[in-house]
């Protein structure tokens, strides 16, 4: 297993975002249940010059503090007062950039993910629930069991890390505009969402 090291995350956010695709995220929850998912959909946020980024213009708040720190930590925030979003801090200290994880597919322990997501076994889900299992930032956080208590966790820890299984070196990466950032003026048109089928 090739776990990603700190220097993987310390590079340009657009590069990191694309190279996260096809990698496996491992999370060991409080009950010691290991969940593994494959990253399939991401968005890059390029710090103080990106009008769609929480740190645009140098904005620094208690919420965004982790983005100003060391790469390879996770930044979790809440939207609409109920959905959590998982981001991976990139680049260097005081250059507050991150990659939003938009979508994943289950690799291991889909049963636990289903209980987290819908409070019932995967076999009991209907087609709509299966289709929308983890194809959005709030959905995947619920399936993984991630919330604000995990904000700031290090991706080099035994409980949370990403590894490369070597099976996705030649994936077909698609690009598009980022989702739900119409307020971001010209930044709304940047093709900084990357995903694989």
Image (tube, rainbow, N blue to C red):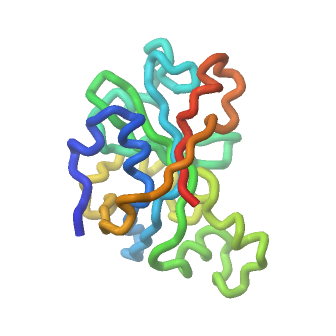
Q: Residue at x 46, y 43 (%)?
A: 87
Q: Residue at x 67, y 48 (%)?
A: 82
How many labels were placed on the picture?
0
- Quarter of the figure with residue 116: bottom right
Above or below 120: residue 132: above
- Expressed as whole percent of the image width and height from the top left, the position of residue 154 reads 30, 49
Relative to 105, 5 lies left or right: left
Q: Nearer the viewer, residue 36 or 62?
A: 36
Q: Nearer the viewer, residue 141 or 194?
A: 194
**Looking at this rendering, what residue extends furthest in the bottom direction?**
123
Relative to 125, 169 lies left or right: left
Above or below 149: residue 27: below
Quick one: quadrant of the C terminus?
bottom right
Relative to 91, 124 lies left or right: right
Q: Residue at x 70, y 64 (%)?
A: 132
- Expressed as whole percent of the image width and height from the top left, the position of residue 143 reads 57, 65
Q: Nearer the viewer, residue 50 or 31?
A: 50
- Expressed as whole percent of the image width and height from the top left, the position of residue 162 reads 33, 59
Relative to 96, 173 lies left or right: right
**Looking at this rendering, what residue extends furthest in the top direction?**
57
Q: Residue at x 55, y 72 (%)?
A: 113
- Expressed as whole percent of the image width and height from the top left, the position of residue 146 reads 50, 57
Quick one: quadrant of the N terminus?
bottom left
């Amino acid at each position: 297993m090739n776990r990603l090291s700190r220097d993987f995350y310390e590079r340009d956010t657009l590069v990191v975002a694309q190279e996260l695709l096809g990698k496996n995220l491992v999370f060991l929850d409080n009950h010691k249940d290991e969940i593994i998912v494959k990253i399939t959909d991401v968005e890059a946020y390029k710090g103080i010059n990106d009008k769609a980024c929480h740190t645009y213009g140098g904005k620094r708040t208690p919420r965004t503090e982790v983005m100003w720190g060391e790469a390879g930590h996770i930044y979790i925030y809440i939207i609409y007062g109920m959905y959590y979003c998982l981001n991976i801090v990139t680049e260097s200290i005081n250059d507050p950039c991150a990659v939003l994880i938009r979508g994943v597919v289950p690799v291991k322990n889909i049963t636990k993910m289903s209980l987290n997501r819908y409070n019932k076994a995967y076999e009991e889900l209907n087609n709509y629930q299966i289709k929308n299992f983890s194809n959005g930032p709030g959905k995947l956080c619920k399936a993984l069991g991630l919330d604000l208590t995990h904000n700031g966790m290090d991706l080099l820890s035994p409980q949370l890390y990403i590894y490369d299984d070597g099976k996705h070196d030649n994936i077909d990466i698609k690009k598009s505009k980022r989702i739900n950032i119409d307020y971001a003026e010209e930044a709304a048109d940047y093709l900084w969402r990357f995903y694989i089928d």
